[in-house]
Image (tube, rainbow, N blue to C red):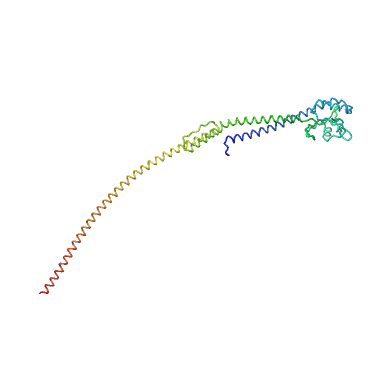
Amino acid sequence: MKFNLQIKLLSLVVMVVSLVLIILLLQTISRERQIFQVSFKEKAEVLTLALDAGIGSFEELKDTAKLQSNIYKFIWLYPEIVKISISVPSPEGLKIVASNATEEIGTLTGLENTISYEQGRVLTQTLLLPDDTKVFSSIIPIRVGGQRVGTYDIRLSLETEEKTIAQRQKEVVLTILVSIVIIIIILFLLLSKMVVLPVAEIKKGLEMIGQGQLSWRITPRSQDEIGDLARGVNEMSEKLEESYYGLEKKIAERTEELQEARSVLEIKVQARTRELKDLAESLEKQVEQRTKELQEKIEELERFNRLAVGRELKMIELKKELRKLKKEQ
């Protein structure tokens, strides 16, 4: 299958644009996830401050019923909260003393809580629960009077975030598709005007020149490389036309010279023919004259021969008569 230049250029540009838009989509989604992560971290810190406001002394940390009531109150106020656990130090390690996951109360916390408590820093991560629910976990030290006395383990559901991101993905994908269609239409029109039509005109000009129409000229439509190509084709056509007509002129001149030489040669041949004819006629006359002279010589010799023979016969007869006369005497 043969693809023309316009389809090739459109395909190339569409692939490049699609790649760029996909990269932008991925960057946008990644940036939104980062924004959500920061937002959830800030929300967890705000919740921590609110929880800290309800704990004014070490004795209040021992009131597990009040801590548990505050946890349920926050979960009711913020439905995106999946879990809140409060851990305090014990001889065995950090132990959970209050949580909406009541089965975890009295158990030791994980390593992240110990690190957060000992180093006094906030640890965040995204977790996937056994029921395939994605949550944002934020472990924050509990401070009372400027001292670390435990940790909060707050987990926020990412279901809203995932739905928002999925919706944003659909919107961005739709935007990309619409953008690609618009870009294709714009590029089709631009390429037709700026590239395809000038190239087609150059192609037609080359075909006409190839057919011998050396006077064909292309109208340059721009000052770029395609315009330079059109002007180059025109220059080539002009040079070919000059060469062709120059060659025609030389051929005509040479033909005229050859015709003149032929005429001169014909005249010389005719003169030579006449000379040869005259010479032949002269030779023929000379041959006839010579033949006549020879014939006369032959006839004269024959007469002489006859005379000689007759004379000889007479001499014989005279000799016979002399012998006869001698005998008679």
What is the x, y in percent for residue 305? 19, 63
Give the side of residue 54 with respect to residue 173, left or right: right
Residue 202, percent from left and from top? 52, 35
Q: Quadrant of residue 196?
A: top right
Which part of the image, by quadrant, shows the N terminus?
A: top right
Q: Is residue 84 above or below residue 256?
A: above
Q: Is residue 160 above or below residue 257?
A: above
Total numbered circles: 0
- The residue positioned farthest toward the left in the image shown: 329
Give percent across and percent down for residue 223. Answer: 54, 31
Q: For this view, does 215 lie left or right of residue 140?
A: left
**Camera-nearest residue between 225 and 292:** 292
The quarter of the rendered structure image containing the C terminus is: bottom left
| Residue 78 point in image, percent of width and height | 80, 26
Q: 282 or 328, which lies in front?
A: 328
Q: Is residue 288 left or right of residue 60?
A: left
In the foreground, 282 or 81: 81
